[in-house]
Image (cartoon, rainbow, N blue to C red):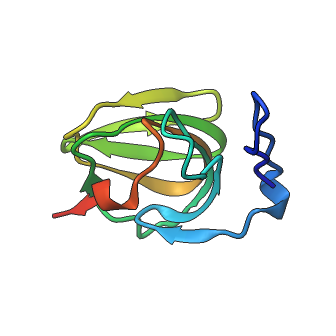
Amino acid sequence: MSTAETKNYLIERFDEIEPTPCPCGQARRAFSVPENTTATMHLVDISRDSAVHYHKKMTEIYFVLEGEGHLELDGEIVPVQPMTAVFIKPGCRHRAVGNLKIINVPVPAFDPEDEWLD
């Protein structure tokens, strides 16, 4: 429901966004409109089989809403639980493991061309 026309704001309802497969599981991507290059926000259900990936340009901020598990960050295992936030810089090879629901804020806005698998 992005309403970018001429307004100075955008509104999204995550319950109305269709999930999209991603290396981490299923993502509902908000604010993904061509005129927005600043940042997007994703509600992600993490799969146990998430793939190690990285971004060359994009920074991601993960905020754990539900569940427990860990992130692999450049080969290091970091336990996470609700209320944990992680700032992932470009080039950091990462994946989430466990039964988790997170908010992911990509900066700049998510670009599927900047998603690299080893």
User: Picture quarter containing residue 114?
Assistant: bottom left
Q: Is residue 43 above or below residue 21?
A: above
- Please tell me which residue is depicted at 83% across the width and 59% down the height of the picture: 15
- Is 57 or 42 nearer to us in this picture? 57
- Is 75 or 113 nearer to us in this picture? 113
Q: Left of 15 or right of it: where is 86?
A: left
- What is the x, y in percent for residue 38? 50, 33
Q: Could you tell me which quadrant the C terminus lies in? A: bottom left
Q: Left of 103 or right of it: where is 55?
A: left
- Is 12 or 89 nearer to us in this picture? 12
- What is the x, y in percent for residue 17? 75, 63
- Is 88 or 40 nearer to us in this picture? 40
- Please tell me which residue is depicted at 56% across the width and 41% down the height of the picture: 36
- Please tell me which residue is depicted at 83% across the width and 50% down the height of the picture: 13
- What is the x, y in percent for residue 55? 27, 47
Q: Residue furthest left?
A: 118
**How many numbered circles are shown?**
0
User: Picture quarter containing residue 35?
Assistant: top right
Q: Could you tell me which quadrant the N terminus lies in? A: bottom right
Q: Left of 78 or right of it: where is 32?
A: right
Q: Is residue 23 above or below residue 109?
A: below
- What is the x, y in percent for residue 90? 25, 36
